[in-house]
Amino acid sequence: MPKKRRQHPTHSRLGNPYPVGLSHVVMDGPPGSTDLEQPWAGMDYDPGVAADDYLYEQPDPKWPRLKLYLAPRRRRETEEQYEGYRRGIERCTCLHAIYLGLCQLLSTHLGSHWTCAEGACRRNGCCVGIRDQDYYSLPLLVYPPCVPLDREITETCRMEIIAEMKRVVARGNEARPKAEPATAGRRRVGP
């Protein structure tokens, strides 16, 4: 009698379907422990003061642009200290925007944009959704609205992005053309 193949679950413990074609991340713990939104329920989330201008980091226009949320300068804080703080916040926000862009690319590849609640995603034919930046904290903003805030689903997406980045780096090292000397292809002048 042939052995039964172990079937992977099709839905997370919160009932959200796993993305098709990705290897699933199943987490241990009590039911409800995988809900990312639950810990913030009922809490007053004060992100700080919103700013649109980046002074030190210039976000790449091909990635989504996120708002900066800055704490006001403290009374005993020097200009240099606040500048260092702001540089760090700008860099961290730019990195989160790149990760959001990678999640949007993954969502587009999976076809989530065709059934997304965001009209802009359906109209553009690709994922361009961004969660409400005034409501969600920066770590949750890296997931577009079509990705449920379920730790098993977000970890599945995160692991696929990491695996794809490793594949791109490996392909880049193998497929990179050999550098030719600076004199290659030039005509020789003289004897």
Image (spheres, rainbow, N blue to C red):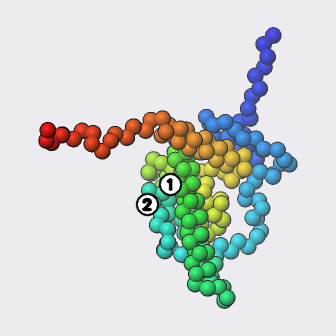
Find out whether the residues at labels 2 and 1 contact each other: C-beta distance under 8 Å: no
Residue 61: which numbered mark, if any?
2
3D distance between C-alphas at marks 2 and 1: 13 Å
In the displayed structure, would residue 115 be above or below residue 43? above
* Residue 142, percent from left and from top: 60, 57
- N-term-proximal mark, 2 vs 1: 2
* Residue farthest to the left, as pictured: 190
Question: In the rendered view of the protein, which quadrant contains the C terminus?
Answer: top left
Residue 128: which numbered mark, if any?
1
In the displayed structure, does residue 135 sit left or right of residue 119?
right
* Residue 45, percent from left and from top: 70, 71
In the displayed structure, would residue 144 be above or below residue 180? below
Disc 1 residue type (three-letter) = Val
How busy is the neighbourhood of tag 1: few (under 14 within 10 Å), some, or many (20 plus)? many
Residue visible at 64% across and 67% down? 135
Nearer to us in this view, 135 or 25:
25
Nearer to us in this view, 90 or 110:
90
Disc 2 residue type (three-letter) = Pro
Q: Secondary structure at mark 1?
A: loop
In the displayed structure, would residue 88 be above or below residue 129? below
* Residue 184, percent from left and from top: 27, 39
Q: Secondary structure at mark 2?
A: loop
Question: In the rendered view of the protein, which quadrant contains the N terminus?
Answer: top right
Q: Quadrant of residue 137?
A: bottom right
Nearer to us in this view, 91 or 122:
91
Q: Is residue 72 visible?
A: yes
Residue visible at 60% across and 41% down? 163
Of circles 2 and 1, which is in front? 2
In the displayed structure, does residue 94 sit left or right of residue 33?
left
Residue 40: which numbered mark, if any?
none
Residue visible at 76% across and 22% down? 5
* Residue 173, percent from left and from top: 49, 39
